[in-house]
Image (spheres, rainbow, N blue to C red):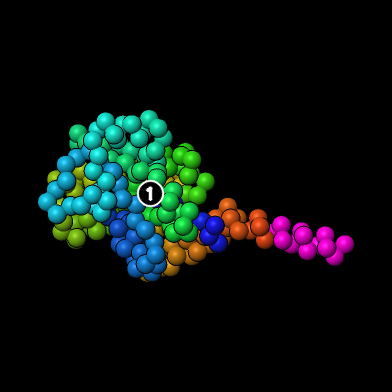
Amino acid sequence: MTDRRGLLIILSSPSGAGKSTLAKRLMAWDPGLAFSVSATTRDPRPGEEHGREYYFMSEEDFKGQVTEGEMLEHAHVFGNFYGSPAGPVRETIESGQDVLFDVDWQGEIQIRNSDLGKHALSIFILPPSIVELRRRLETRAQDSADVIAKRMLKSWDEISHWGYYDYVLVNDDLDETEAKLKTIVEAERMRRIQQPMLQNHVRDLQAQFEEMS
């Protein structure tokens, strides 16, 4: 048994709020942090490897794992299924490693309601304003005007579910938000349920007390 059980760290935000950058910074800060590898029923693209980019599965196997409760969260997107297999995540957190998830609010609810939900830590990243959110989408120059418009329309639906999360950070300064994120993770690692060795330690203290009586 390890001294610490890993966390399921869930990061969510509307596109452009800074979630991906914060996730990269978090993983650079702690290289031991594992990123959750999703399963999918789509075919591998050139250069993709099973277990690295995705766990590639047949639709039958995927649905079977959903039925058996072995998908922490799942969704049907553009004709294919995507999800987070519970087995690898369970093994990782039992070894003392944290697992980082990049999912939306629906995925957060599914993970929270799973058998591993008691080890989940969910954090929502808000933009300082809608004007700033649009500016960030435009200045990163990754999407067309039509795609940006669609992302903006979707952003309020995502923002409206902020109340489901344990913590909510307003990302008006990236360095400050990163510092707050690290503080949250460090504190949550010390939760009683994340420290399985505490029970044995308390038993030892009880035995010592009884010996002195």
Judge from the rendering whether residue 172 lies leftward or rightward of residue 146; answer left or right: right
Magenta-tinted stretch: 202-213
Q: Is the N terminus in the top left, top right, bottom left or bottom right quadrant?
A: bottom right
Residue 110 image point, x, y percent? 41, 39
126 or 181: nearer the eye? 181
Q: Who's the residue at 45% across and 65% down the image?
A: 182
Prevailing secondary structure class for the magenta stretch in the rendered image? helix
Q: Is residue 209 magenta?
A: yes
Residue on which the image places disc 1? 88
Q: For residue 139, what is the image quadrant?
A: bottom left
- Disc 1 crowd, CA 10 A, few/some/many (<14, 14-19, 20+): few
Res. 18 visible in picture: no
Judge from the rendering whether residue 173 lies leftward or rightward of residue 198; answer left or right: left
Residue 111 image point, x, y percent? 42, 42
Q: Who's the residue at 23% across and 43% down the image?
A: 56
Residue 14 image point, x, y percent? 31, 49
Q: Who's the residue at 70% across and 58% down the image?
A: 202
Judge from the rendering whether residue 164 lies leftward or rightward of residue 140; answer left or right: right
Q: Is residue 53 magenta?
A: no
180 or 132: nearer the eye? 180
Q: Is the C terminus in the top left, top right, bottom left or bottom right quadrant?
A: bottom right
Relative to 144, is 180 above or below?
A: below
Secondary element at image label 1: helix
Q: For residue 43, what is the image quadrant?
A: top left
Residue 19 image point, x, y percent? 33, 56
Q: For residue 176, what is the image quadrant?
A: bottom left
